[in-house]
Image: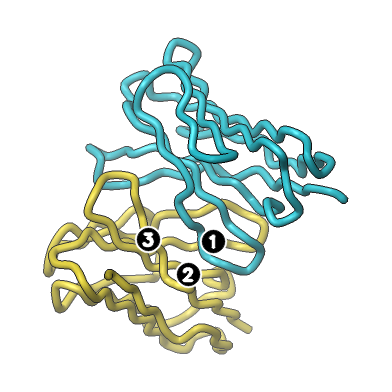
Amino acid sequence: QKEVEQNSGPLSVPEGAIASLNCTYSDRGSQSFFWYRQYSGKSPELIMFIYSNGDKEDGRFTAQLNKASQYVSLLIRDSQPSDSATYLCAVPTGGGNKLTFGTGTQLKVEL
Amino acid sequence: SQTIHQWPATLVQPVGSPLSLECTVEGTSNPNLYWYRQAAGRGLQLLFYSVGIGQISSEVPQNLSASRPQDRQFILSSKKLLLSDSGFYLCAWSLTTGELFFGEGSRLTVL
């Protein structure tokens, strides 16, 4: 079982809709979770992280964590074409010195 | 503010040729440093990470090597490139678990 799993997509949503991106992880001991955004041909950038069960909101982004289900998600409200990118979920491993990434979900926001 | 520089941005190399990619970080001290590779259409694969000068951890057996000759310098090398070494190489730094800051990346094509 992979440490971090994501649906590769593409996930297509109309402009203004809510995009929901999902990630599951295998290590029940994981304490923190990170979402990165990667535009085509560019390097990833951190957009959110979450440590506690429940929701964390930052502008149009909401991260949701359910440790019992080993599930973390990212919601993007009022999706814009500029949100079209690949979203990578990541979990610290190896004692916290390493960050293991999922393969990413490609999001397409259509006009 | 902290910045990370990675070069060269693009290179095309023949099979069997050597490789050297360099990364430097400015504006911080004793960062954790990482080399990731992203093959076309695939996720980020951690190649090496370093928590200090001369301390290198290798994640994947391969014909690549890494060195950290100075606190804020990280070098990825190969003596003989393989076709399978083609990809997008990303250097990153962090001070806090999970919060990685990536360089612009080096796109390597091995012919």
> In the rendered image, which residue does mark 1 sit on?
B38
Residue at the outermost right position: A111
> In the rendered image, which residue does mark 3 sit on?
B101
Vertical side of B52 occupied by B105: above or below: below
Q: Secondary structure at mark 2?
A: strand
- Is there CB contact under 8 Å for labels 3 and 2? no
Dot 2 amino acid type: Tyr
Q: Residue at x 41, y 43 (%)?
A: A100
Q: Secondary structure at mark 1?
A: strand
- For marks 3 and 2, give the one nearer the viewer: 3
Q: Residues within 10 Å of mark 1 (few under 14, many from 20)?
A: some
Vertical side of A9 occupied by B6: above or below: below
- Is there CB contact under 8 Å for labels 2 and 1? yes
Q: Chain for mark 1?
A: B
Q: Chain for mark 2?
A: B
> In the rendered image, which residue does mark 2 sit on?
B89
Residue A40: % across, % down: 66, 64
Which disc is residue B104 wearing? Answer: none
Quarter residue A34 falls in: top left
Depth check, front residue: A101 or B4: B4
CA distance separating discs 3 and 2: 14 Å
Which chain shows up in cyan?
A
